[in-house]
Image: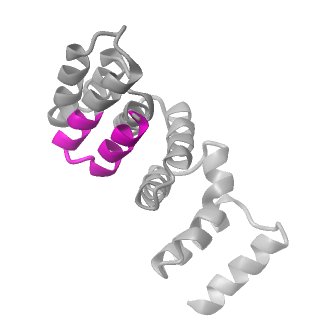
């Protein structure tokens, strides 16, 4: 309810809110499509690596949807550091690295598949693309290959970012 949200916001302003309160406030804001406010509530959890998986997923997707890939990358880095055994965290971090500099190695990508074999359909084209690229190739070439591979698995925003970074 709006009254509950106001109470949580007030507690947050007074810095008398715990992690559960921050989580609830962010969830309430998210459900009202107040995405920036939700992220503001969740940021202390994200930054300390104590956010639940769903918070990282939403925050990263929101940053990707709004073209803020550097922030999405930072969130993904915090997530994979906080939970290195999470296959989705590994996959998300890996594809963001791939889009930003084209240098993720196959071992990192395969780690996501080891954690969750269901990811192999998405990871296999990326590993194959990386295998085609000579490590000594110019960054632009690696990024073009990365962009094509990301596009082939439907990661369009990251494919576009890789192409843009290939300039």
Q: Quadrant of the N terminus?
A: bottom right
Where are the magenta residues, as a range? 147-166
Residue 103 visible to the viewer: no
Q: Residue at x 17, y 27 (%)?
A: 124
Tell me if residue 62 comes above or below residue 10 in the rendering: above
Q: Is residue 165 magenta?
A: yes
Q: Position of residue 92 (x, y in %)?
A: 38, 40
Name the side, left or right, on which 139 lies relative to 17.
left
Please tell me in which quadrant of the rendered image residue 95 appears. Answer: top left
User: Which of the pair 138/96 is nearer the observer?
Assistant: 138
Image x and y of residue 164, in percent: 39, 42
The residue shown at (54%, 44%) is 70
126, 85: nearer the viewer = 126
Q: Position of residue 76 (x, y in %)?
A: 49, 41
4 or 68, nearer to the observer: 68
> What secondary structure is the stretch in magenta mostly built from?
helix
The image shows residue 158, relative to residue 87, as above or below, that is below
Residue located 49% across and 51% down the image: 56
Please indicate, yes or no, whether residue 62 appears anywhere in the rendered image: yes
Question: Taking 18 as reference, is 36 left or right?
Answer: left
């Amino acid at each position: 309810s709006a009254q509950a949200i106001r109470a949580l916001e007030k507690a947050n302003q007074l810095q008398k809110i715990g992690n559960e309160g921050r989580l609830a406030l962010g969830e309430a804001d998210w459900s009202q499509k107040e995405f920036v406010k939700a992220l503001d509530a969740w940021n202390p959890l994200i930054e300390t690596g104590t956010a639940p998986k769903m918070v990282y997923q939403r925050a990263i997707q929101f940053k990707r949807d709004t073209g803020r890939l550097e922030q999405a990358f930072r969130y993904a880095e915090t997530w994979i550091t906080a939970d290195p055994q999470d296959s989705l965290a590994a996959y998300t971090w890996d594809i963001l690295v791939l889009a930003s500099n084209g240098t993720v190695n196959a071992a990192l990508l395969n780690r996501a598949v080891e954690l969750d074999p269901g990811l192999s359909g998405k990871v296999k084209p990326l590993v194959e693309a990386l295998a085609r690229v000579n490590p000594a190739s110019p960054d632009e070439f690696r990024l073009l290959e990365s962009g094509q591979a990301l596009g082939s698995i439907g990661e369009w925003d990251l494919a576009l970012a890789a192409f843009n970074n290939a300039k």
